[in-house]
Amino acid sequence: MDRNEELRQWFALAEQNLQVAQHLADNMHPTPDETICNQCQQSAEKYLKGYLYINFIEPPKIHDLSKLLVLCQDISQDFEKFEKQCAFLSNFGVMPKYPNELNICEDDMKASVRFAKSIKNFVLSKTKPL
């Protein structure tokens, strides 16, 4: 598989996570806030890993967006503006095993969707196909 195709797959999976989050937010009542937040974290993770991949850095198999962001900042300092968003979304990388473990509210869910979309748009604006 060539690099462009693999990059398309990273971004297709990331977009799928984001679309699932948006669909759940728009269509389920009450909203499954934990699931939406997890999908947003997964989307941001894949967009950041896609950015690393396109810049010839093998994405590490981690879920900590703050650590991924540091690797992205090594390529472009412009990523520093996402430090708070990545720290916030990292809380949702692994789904809790017990009810109400994270105490997520609707504002958290809405922020997660907003943050994931901004990371997506930023990564895509900085990514050119090989």
Image (tube, grey):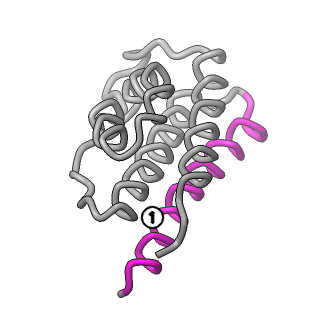
- Residue 90 or 98: which is nearer the viewer? 90
Q: Position of residue 43 (x, y in %)?
A: 50, 47
Q: Is residue 35 magenta?
A: no
Q: Secondary structure at mark 1?
A: helix
- Residue 86 or 94: which is nearer the viewer? 86
Type of the residue with mark 1: Trp
Please provide the residue range marked out in magenta: 2-29
With respect to residue 3, does 27 lie above or below? above
Q: Position of residue 62 (x, y in %)?
A: 24, 44
Q: Is residue 24 magenta?
A: yes
In this image, 98 relative to 110: left or right? left
**Quadrant of residue 116 in the image?**
top right
Name the residue: 50% across, 29% down: 34
- Residue 125 or 36: which is nearer the viewer? 125
Q: Position of residue 102 (x, y in %)?
A: 41, 16
Name the residue: 50% across, 26% down: 81
Tally of numbered discs: 1
Which residue was labeled with disc 1? Answer: 10
In this image, 107 relative to 8: left or right? right
Q: Position of residue 48 (x, y in %)?
A: 42, 48
Quadrant location of the N terminus in the rendered image? bottom left
For mark 1, does the 10 Å Cα neighbourhood hold few (<14), some (14 to 19), or many (20 or more) residues?
many
**Main secondary structure of the magenta stretch:** helix
Name the residue: 55% across, 52% down: 126
Name the residue: 59% across, 44% down: 122
